[in-house]
Amino acid sequence: MTATAERISLNERVEAALETIRPHLRVDGGDVELVEVTDDMHVKIRWMGMCQSCSMSDMTLRAGIQEAIRNKIPEIIGVEAVN
């Protein structure tokens, strides 16, 4: 598999993990967008909708999003929001 194909596959796996958490975010008018998976295996996300200004976003990032991604893709080191 080429490096490009591996990157696409990794992005698809991250998106699939995000899909498991999105219904919970959407209930409160929020969402999350995958920005990138870095070469050092960090996922960068962007909060959308109500999640942008929610005081619970940091907890949701650690306990929800990071947990969902790392459970499905253990090689991911961490997740951070870019906004």
Image (cartoon, helix red, strand yellow):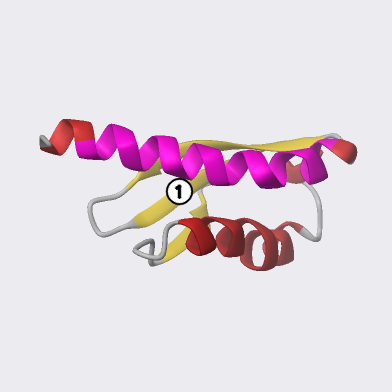
Q: Is residue 23 visible?
A: yes
Q: Residues within 10 Å of mark 1 (few under 14, many from 20)?
A: some
In the drawing, does residue 20 fall left or right of residue 66? right
Amino acid carrying mark 1 in the image: Lys
Q: Position of residue 26 (x, y in %)?
A: 81, 36
Q: Is residue 46 left or right of residue 49?
A: left
Of 30 and 71, nearer the camera is 71
**In which quadrant of the rendered view does residue 7 lie?**
top left
Span shown in magenta? 6-26
Residue at 20 percent across and 31 percent down: it is: 5
Image coordinates for residue 35, horizontal then vertical, percent: 45, 37
The residue that mark 1 highlights is: 44
On the image, which quarter does residue 27 sit in? Answer: top right
Asked if the magenta segment contains residue 15, the reply would be yes
| Image quadrant where one finds the C terminus | top right
8 w.r.t. 62: above or below:
above
Residue at 56% x, 61% y: name it. Answer: 66
* Residue 25 versus residue 55 in the image, above or below: above
User: Quick check: can you spot residue 83?
Assistant: no
